[in-house]
């Protein structure tokens, strides 16, 4: 699940920024979106919904009829949004809650590229998902992070690979990618049981089998010689996968090809999996100090 304040993959947001006479004139709260991908043995549910009216308080962000609410124990997300049909139509509503209880919190940012910051907020957490519609539940490992940038992702990166897995008491993340114009970045971090962050030793990456859209995937050797890869989400410029290491431990992997995302044909396909909601009212503006 991803909540966008200023939807980074929105053609409408990109067009609004291009029309702005000066930097900073486009309000990201006017271009919020919610993305939910639910996969279970019983079926799948997909939401990519742009143009949601946004409201914010010190401890909550509202996107349409859904709310992300910070609690003393972690984060509670209340979902009430129509599923997205192929072609951008509205399907049956997805309703339910997601509760995340971090084992520890790390708020220190990591600079991936000039003006692009990553916040690994909850590298290890317990997640509880309860969907009333279409129905389904999950209890297990969870993770929460955030990205913030001074410009579009495609203006900073050509591609990246990201992998996160739990350890016996903590968690590990490997993040590597290619910068626009040349150069690479790589960060590899480990958190212990109380959230102390330390670097991981270097590890070689090997190419992994590609899915239908042929987005490149790579895996580090941390997970063994022949990890099993199950594709959860396959799009023209993005894949998300479940990876099972040699010892059976699960990891979540994502691969993003922003060089491909910049191509007009890829942006043209976004509308087939995205619902754009006409904003009938300006976003709520509650100026508070976080």
Image (spheres, rainbow, N blue to C red):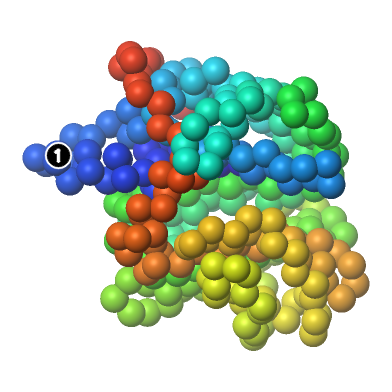
Q: Is residue 112 left or right of residue 162?
A: left
Q: Which residue is mark 1?
A: 20
Whether residue 175 can be seen here = no
Figure quadrant of the N terminus: top right
Q: Residue at x 63, y 24 (%)?
A: 93
Return the residue found at the far right. 247
Q: Residue at x 35, y 33 (%)?
A: 31
Q: Percent position (x, y) of residue 189?
A: 64, 65
Q: Is residue 225 left or right of residue 263?
A: right
Tell me the crowding category of disc 1: few under 14, some 14 to 19, or many 20 or more residues within 10 angstroms, Cα based.
few
Above or below, 239 relative to 274: below
Q: How many marks?
A: 1
Q: Is residue 240 left or right of residue 13?
A: right
Q: Residue at x 50, y 44 (%)?
A: 273
Judging from the image, what secondary structure is the residue with disc 1 in? loop
Whether residue 137 can be seen here = yes
Q: Residue at x 72, y 31 (%)?
A: 98
Above or below, 258 relative to 289: below
- Residue 122 quadrant: top right
Above or below, 273 relative to 290: below
- Residue 99 quadrant: top right
Q: Percent position (x, y) of residue 146?
A: 52, 46
């Amino acid at each position: 699940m991803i909540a966008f304040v200023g939807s980074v993959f929105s053609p409408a947001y990109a067009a609004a920024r291009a029309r702005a006479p000066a930097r900073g004139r486009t309000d990201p709260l006017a271009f919020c979106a919610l993305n939910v991908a639910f996969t279970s043995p019983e079926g799948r549910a997909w939401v990519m919904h742009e143009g949601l009216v946004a409201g914010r308080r010190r401890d909550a962000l509202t996107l349409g009829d859904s709310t992300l609410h910070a609690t003393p124990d972690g984060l509670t997300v209340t979902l009430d949004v129509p599923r997205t049909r192929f072609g951008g139509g509205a399907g049956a509503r997805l309703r339910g809650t997601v509760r995340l209880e971090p084992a520890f919190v790390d708020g220190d940012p990591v600079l991936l590229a000039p003006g692009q910051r990553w916040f690994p907020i909850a590298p290890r957490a317990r997640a509880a998902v309860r969907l009333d519609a279409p129905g389904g539940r999950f209890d297990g490992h969870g993770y929460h992070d955030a990205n913030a940038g001074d410009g579009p992702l495609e203006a900073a990166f050509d591609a990246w690979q990201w992998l996160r897995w739990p350890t016996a008491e903590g968690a590990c993340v490997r993040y590597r990618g290619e910068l626009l114009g040349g150069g690479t970045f790589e960060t590899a971090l480990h958190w212990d049981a109380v959230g102390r962050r330390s670097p991981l030793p270097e590890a070689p990456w090997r190419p992994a089998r590609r899915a239908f859209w042929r987005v490149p995937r790579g895996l580090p050797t941390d997970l063994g010689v022949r990890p099993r890869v199950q594709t959860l989400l396959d799009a023209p410029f993005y894949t998300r996968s479940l990876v099972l290491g040699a010892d059976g431990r699960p990891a979540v992997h994502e691969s993003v090809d922003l060089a491909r995302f910049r191509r007009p044909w890829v942006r043209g396909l976004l509308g087939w999996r995205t619902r754009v909601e006409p904003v009938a009212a300006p976003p709520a503006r509650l100026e508070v100090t976080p």
